Image: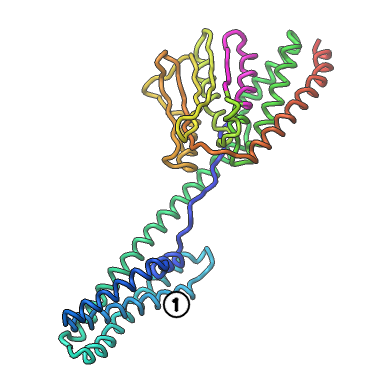
């Protein structure tokens, strides 16, 4: 069984949001800008550099007019999600209009201020060029950066959607070989060891009852995932007999810790497939969990065949684990496949520590339901074993 998909969480950055970022400011930023403007005006007046004061006022007017034009363009941008690329053409067209309007207004303001201040040492072309350069630096360059960020976010969203679709398709299927082998073993045991056949049916029903809801959710708990792993390992222990032993250690205080559904199962299945099945002798599988700092560490170790250094992490299931972690948590999570100090194969998940109270209630309800179903399966298995006998 394969792990589930993470829901895309990438924020959208469209042309309207980009223009709002360019024109928006907080009260603190506005107050600081006003104070700086007042300070520069006082300094220019006291130093009798009135020509610079007139140019400064003209440049401020250019920025104000350019920003106002961009805000007007934002009001008429297409709002449909499908028209986002067209909205960027509107944004670039609005930027061109803003640059022209801002530079033109700077010339007009300078013409009005310079005579009042008794100084006009710059030609209209110089003022226009200065205002155009300033508006390009403070409006056009940031808009280009925001456009690149928008494209990167769109690409990340598409990658997450593709990953989610792929993982959902993998979630929707229970591994046929696992079911076939389990049912075949149950049939054999029903004829020769009916008590073990009943145990296998109990664990299979409990396993499916725990696993199937996980296919339709994006969050689970450590307790629920350890319960699922325990049912699976119990089935495998019946199948392999004395060759396999297992232990699942899930501290009670960590049972409500949030965990992606079916991710632990990928590691446990990998341990059985490449550890137990590949080694003729006795093999033990151990699942444990612990907290280190603000991270939850979940470890699956087996004393099986081990992994060659050349094929570390090359499996499809383990690659999906890495992709899910990267999509859902980014750098806050990690996965490591290694050989332990005693020669055992260790697969370790590192997840941000979080708690899911709703998931805790769901896990408790599921545990009660599993207990009831397991009890009813025992009653239903009695006629089956009698028929097999």
Q: Mark 1: few, some, or many residues within 10 Å (few <14, many ≥20)? A: few
Q: Residue at position x 25%, y 78% from top?
A: 41
Which sits in the foreground, 302 or 151?
Answer: 302
Secondary structure, mark 1, is helix
Tally of marks: 1
Which residues, given as a range, are shown in magenta?
A: 227-249
- Can residue 86 be seen in this snapshot? no
Q: Residue at position x 43%, y 54% from top?
A: 153
Horizontally, residue 15 falls left or right of residue 129, namely: right
Q: Residue at position x 38%, y 62% from top?
A: 147
Q: Position of residue 46 (x, y in %)?
A: 19, 80
Q: Position of residue 52 (x, y in %)?
A: 19, 80
Prevailing secondary structure of the magenta residues: helix
Give residue 193's quadrant in the image: top right
Q: Position of residue 356 (x, y in %)?
A: 60, 39
Can you say which quadrant of the picture contains the C terminus?
top right
- Can residue 167 be seen in this snapshot? yes
Give the labeled residue for mark 1.
72
């Amino acid at each position: 069984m394969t792990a589930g998909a993470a829901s895309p969480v990438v924020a959208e950055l469209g042309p309207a949001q980009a223009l709002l970022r360019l024109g928006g400011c907080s009260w603190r930023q506005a107050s600081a800008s006003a104070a700086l403007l007042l300070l520069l005006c006082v300094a220019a007046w006291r130093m009798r550099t009135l020509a610079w004061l007139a140019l400064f006022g003209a440049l401020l007017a250019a920025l104000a007019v350019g920003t106002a034009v961009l805000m007007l363009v934002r009001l008429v941008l297409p709002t449909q999600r499908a028209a986002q690329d067209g909205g960027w053409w509107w944004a670039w067209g609005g930027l061109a209009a803003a640059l022209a309007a801002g530079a033109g207004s700077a010339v007009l303001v300078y013409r009005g201020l310079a005579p009042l201040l008794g100084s006009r040492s710059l030609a209209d072309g110089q003022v226009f060029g200065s205002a155009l350069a300033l508006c390009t630096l403070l409006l056009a360059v940031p808009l280009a950066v925001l456009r690149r960020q928008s494209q990167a976010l769109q690409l990340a969203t598409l990658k997450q959607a593709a990953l989610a679709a792929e993982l959902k398709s993998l979630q929707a299927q229970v591994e046929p070989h696992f079911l076939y082998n389990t049912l075949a073993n149950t049939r054999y045991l029903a004829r020769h060891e009916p008590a073990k056949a009943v145990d296998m049916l109990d664990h299979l029903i409990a396993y499916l009852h725990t696993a199937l809801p996980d296919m339709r959710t994006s969050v689970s708990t450590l307790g629920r995932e350890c319960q699922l792993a325990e049912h699976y390992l119990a089935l495998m222990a019946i199948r392999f007999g004395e060759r396999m032993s297992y232990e699942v250690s899930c501290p009670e205080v960590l049972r409500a810790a949030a965990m992606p559904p079916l991710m632990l199962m990928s590691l446990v299945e990998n341990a059985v497939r490449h550890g137990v099945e590949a080694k003729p002798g006795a093999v033990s599988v151990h699942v444990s969990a612990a907290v280190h700092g603000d991270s939850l560490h979940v470890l699956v170790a087996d004393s099986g065949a081990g992994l060659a250094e050349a094929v570390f992490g090359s499996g499809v299931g383990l690659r999906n684990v890495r992709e899910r972690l990267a999509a859902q948590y980014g750098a806050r999570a990690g996965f490591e496949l290694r050989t332990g100090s005693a020669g055992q194969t260790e697969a370790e998940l590192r997840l941000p520590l979080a708690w899911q109270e709703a998931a805790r209630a769901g896990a408790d309800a599921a545990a009660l339901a599993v207990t009831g179903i397991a009890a009813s399966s025992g009653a239903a298995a009695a006629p089956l074993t009698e028929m097999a006998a």
